[in-house]
Image: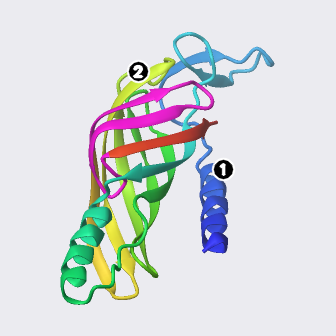
Amino acid sequence: MKTKIISLILILFFAASTFAHETENNTELPSRESTADTTTLVNKDGTPFKRHTISVGYGILTLSDFYGMLGSVIVSMFDGDDPFGTLGALSIDYGYKIGEFFETGLVFNYAEPIKNTPLYTIMPRAKMNFNSTGFFNPFMEVDLGVSFNGDGVIPMFQLTLLGFEMGTTIPVIINILSFGQRGMFYGSIGFKF
């Protein structure tokens, strides 16, 4: 399991460097290093615009937690053995800011709601930032994807009506009004570059 998570982190890192082209429209200022016609993207306050974010977080009361709790209650009534696994889910996120307000990316999520039955989730995400160039950034987010284990594949989602991102280079991210596979209560720490 550890090798799978490390492999995923490396894949996300290399994917981030692949998407490192700067083609979107923010404020363009001439580069100070050259008098040629080259330009550099910057925020409104003059700092470089950071498009990429990688974060790692943990959430509790996920959809799979509810499935695991329900299954645990039903099986315990008839068998006496409690099959409930681990509460919560670990997520690794990659985000790419297309512009100042819209961000897209990918979420990988790992949970074990039933003992010895891991559940893997992959969800593309769409995030709307309301102050992406500031220290405090409220946001809304929708993730839609699939979860799979050895038994099959099911559709999965995460809806965040209100979240907060605090920090400019190493942000702390908290989802407050959310529901889905990343959890009703979710927090993460990231790195912007």
For image coordinates 61% across by 42% down, the residue present is: 21
In the image, which disc is placed on residue 17? 1
Work out whether mark 2 precedes mark 1 in sequence or the reverse, and give the earlier one: 1
Residue type pointed to by label 2? Asn
- 2 vs 1, front mark: 2
For image coordinates 50% across by 48% down, the residue present is: 57
Q: Left or right: 124 with respect to 97?
A: left
For image coordinates 47% across by 35% down, the residue present is: 173
Residue 165 figure quarter = top left
- SS for dot 2: loop
Task: Judge whether 147 appears above or below 52 on screen.
Answer: below
Dominant secondary structure (helix, strand or loop) of the stretch shown in magenta: strand
In the image, which disc is placed on residue 131? 2
**Start and end of the magenta stretch?**
160-184
Distance between mark 2 and mark 1 Cα atoms = 24 Å
Q: Where does residue 36 sit, x and y in percent of width and height?
A: 75, 20
Pick whichever, 121 or 125, lies toward us.
121
Q: How is the image coloured?
A: rainbow
For image coordinates 41% across by 58% down, the residue present is: 88
- SS for dot 1: helix
Residue type pointed to by label 1? Ser
Q: Where does residue 187 sit, x and y in percent of width and height?
A: 45, 41
